[in-house]
Image (tube, grey):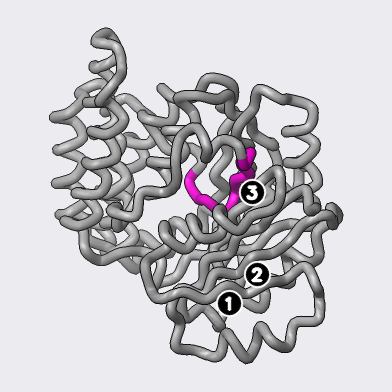
């Protein structure tokens, strides 16, 4: 039996899926199966899958039902003790599975282990941003205030956790992974491998343009999370909403819309005034000012220069 089941939900993903699978098959840990869930694709995924010669790779096709349903299908078919998720456009470094398996083997109370994440562009090149958190143990409070796991592609979960917390919520159009990690964190300890082993691809298709729909899903996740918490923890709900609005503001920054970013920043401060002193909010305020003064292209140029200078300093002193 495989120790790990790797679940890859795929919907018309042939542009990136071959490289994603290659990064999985190049893992130093080899006792795994790969379940590619074809979620009603209209591309050549079935023909492509039929050409795969590695017996660990299996294709499961279903009518289009969304990423949550595809992940649930993968979990239902998983034979492994651990389940690792990777989106069809993301990549893994070769030692990811090895280090996560070791973590779960050595820490039986841990239900989920995640890694640090490098953001890459459409061509697979790093864009100068790394999502790195030291949060582990009882992380529910930290997770509700700010989703430090960030991408489902960095996670490995004990299969037995889903027997306790249930499957992914198929009613959510967005943030379904945050909802799942919160449910797991409410029952289990969480661990982190403090290395950038997940590569999270940024492109137009993985960022929703429907902000109202996104906000509704995020609101649903927050309200679900606070249904059964003690009364003395309800103050965290406003912090959660503040964090959500800051995240929306940063999406507006990426779109070059400083007015929308300023609106979301205001909403964040209305939820939690102390947020104005956080590093995330201070950086946001600087970004809003720079776009207002120099325009989106000027801001992008300054940010790119900053990334180059930071990388140069790391090369000199690293």
Cβ atoms at labels 2 and 3 below 8 Å apart: no
Compared with 262, 136 (above or below) is above
Which mark is drawn over residue 16? 1
User: Badge 2: few (under 14), some or many (20 or more) residues near its Cα, within 10 Å?
Assistant: many
Q: Report whether 278 appears left or right of 96.
A: left
Cβ atoms at labels 1 and 2 below 8 Å apart: yes
Between the residue at mark 1 and the residue at mark 2, the CA separation in whole angstroms equals 6 Å
Q: Nearer the viewer, mark 1 or mark 3?
A: 3
The residue identified by callout 2 is 20
Which picture quadrant has residue 170?
bottom left
From where the camera sits, is residue 127 visible?
A: no
Q: What residue sits 36% from the left and 29% below the top?
A: 145
> Which residue is at the front of the view, 167 or 12?
167
Between the residue at mark 1 and the residue at mark 3, the CA separation in whole angstroms equals 21 Å
Q: Secondary structure at mark 2?
A: helix
Q: Secondary structure at mark 1?
A: loop
> Which residue is at the front of the view, 197 or 275?
197
Q: What residue sits 81% from the left and 81% below the top?
A: 53
The residue identified by callout 3 is 83
Q: What residue sits 66% from the left and 83% below the top?
A: 49
Image position, residue 260 (x, y; %): 17, 54
Image position, residue 19 (x, y; %): 67, 75
Number of labels in the image equals: 3
Q: Looking at the image, is mark 2 or mark 3 earlier in the sequence? A: 2
Where does the magenta region start and end?
A: 150-159
Image position, residue 105 (x, y; %): 78, 32
Image position, residue 282 (x, y; %): 33, 35
Q: Report whether 310 appears left or right of 63.
A: right
Between the residue at mark 2 and the residue at mark 3, the CA separation in whole angstroms equals 16 Å
Q: Nearer the viewer, mark 2 or mark 3?
A: 3
């Amino acid at each position: 039996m495989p120790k790990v089941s790797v679940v890859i939900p795929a919907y018309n993903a042939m542009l990136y899926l071959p490289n994603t699978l290659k990064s999985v098959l190049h893992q130093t840990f080899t006792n795994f199966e790969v379940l590619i869930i074809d979620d009603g694709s209209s591309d050549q995924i079935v023909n492509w899958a039929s050409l795969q010669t590695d017996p660990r790779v299996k294709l499961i096709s279903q009518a289009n039902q969304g990423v949550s349903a595809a992940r649930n299908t993968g979990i239902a078919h998983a034979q492994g003790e651990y389940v690792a998720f990777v989106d069809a456009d993301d990549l893994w470094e070769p030692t990811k599975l090895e280090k996560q398996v070791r973590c779960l083997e050595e820490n039986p109370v841990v239900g989920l282990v995640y890694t640090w994440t490098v953001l890459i562009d459409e061509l697979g090149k790093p864009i100068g941003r790394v999502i790195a958190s030291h949060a582990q143990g009882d992380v529910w409070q930290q997770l509700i205030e700010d989703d430090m796991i960030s991408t489902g592609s960095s996670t490995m979960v004990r299969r037995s956790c889903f027997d306790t917390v249930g499957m992914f919520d198929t009613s959510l159009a967005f943030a379904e992974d945050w909802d799942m990690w919160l449910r797991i964190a409410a029952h289990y300890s969480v661990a982190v491998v403090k290395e950038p082993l997940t590569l999270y691809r940024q492109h137009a298709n993985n960022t929703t343009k429907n902000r109202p729909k996104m906000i509704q899903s995020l609101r649903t996740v927050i309200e679900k999370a606070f249904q059964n918490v003690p009364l003395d923890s309800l103050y965290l709900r406003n912090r959660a909403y503040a964090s959500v609005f800051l995240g929306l503001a940063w999406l507006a920054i990426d779109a070059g819309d400083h007015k929308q970013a300023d609106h979301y920043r205001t909403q964040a401060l209305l939820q939690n005034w102390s947020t104005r002193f956080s590093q995330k909010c201070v950086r946001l305020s600087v970004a809003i000012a720079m776009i207002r003064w120099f325009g989106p292209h000027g801001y992008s140029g300054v940010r790119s220069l900053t990334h180059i200078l930071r990388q140069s300093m790391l090369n000199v002193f690293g």
